[in-house]
Amino acid sequence: MANGQMKTVGGLLMRVLGVLLVVVGVLGALASLTQGNVVGMVLGVVLVAGGAVLLKRSGRAGRSGVVASTR
């Protein structure tokens, strides 16, 4: 079992990697769009989607045991 500090470091690493993937994906897609490179645009979209998944998984929204307040 991982302790709380290990989960925090893992979440932070996932956030940093997710942000980097989104930034690189957007820049790559825009650069490919100006050149008309379809493969580069698809790769950019895939990188953005992967970064978004990492960002979502690094948050607390999907973890069990977290109860949202109804007030």
Image: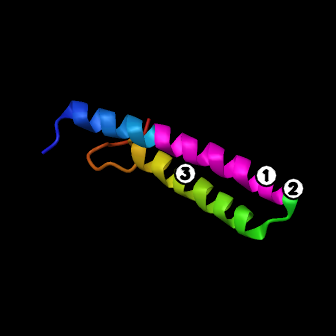
Magenta segment boundaries in residue numbering:
16-34
Examine the image and state in which quarter residue 13 appears: top left
Label 3 residue SS: helix
Q: Residue at x 77, y 69 (%)?
A: 38
Q: Residues within 10 Å of mark 3 (few under 14, many from 20)?
A: some
Residue linked to disc 3: 52
Classify the position of the C terminus by image quarter. top left
Label 1 residue SS: helix
Residue linked to disc 1: 30
How far across and down, in percent of the image, does residue 60 sit? Answer: 38, 41
Label 2 residue SS: helix
The residue sitting at the left extreme is 1
The question of residue 57 being in magenta is answered with: no
Q: Residue at x 36, y 39 (%)?
A: 11
How far across and down, in percent of the image, does residue 52 sit? Answer: 55, 51
Q: Residue flagged by tag 1: what amino acid is it?
A: Leu
Residue linked to disc 2: 34
Q: Residue flagged by tag 2: what amino acid is it?
A: Thr
Foreground tag (1 vs 3): 1
Q: Are marks 2 and 1 in contact (CB under 8 Å)?
A: yes
Say if 46 sits above or below 21 in the image: below
> Residue 29 or 3: which is nearer the viewer?
29
Q: CA distance from mark 2 to mark 3?
A: 24 Å
Q: Residues within 10 Å of mark 2 (few under 14, many from 20)?
A: few
How far across and down, in percent of the image, does residue 31 sit? Answer: 79, 52
How far across and down, in percent of the image, does residue 51 sit? Answer: 54, 51
Q: CA distance from mark 1 to mark 3?
A: 17 Å
Residue 2 placement, left or right of 21:
left
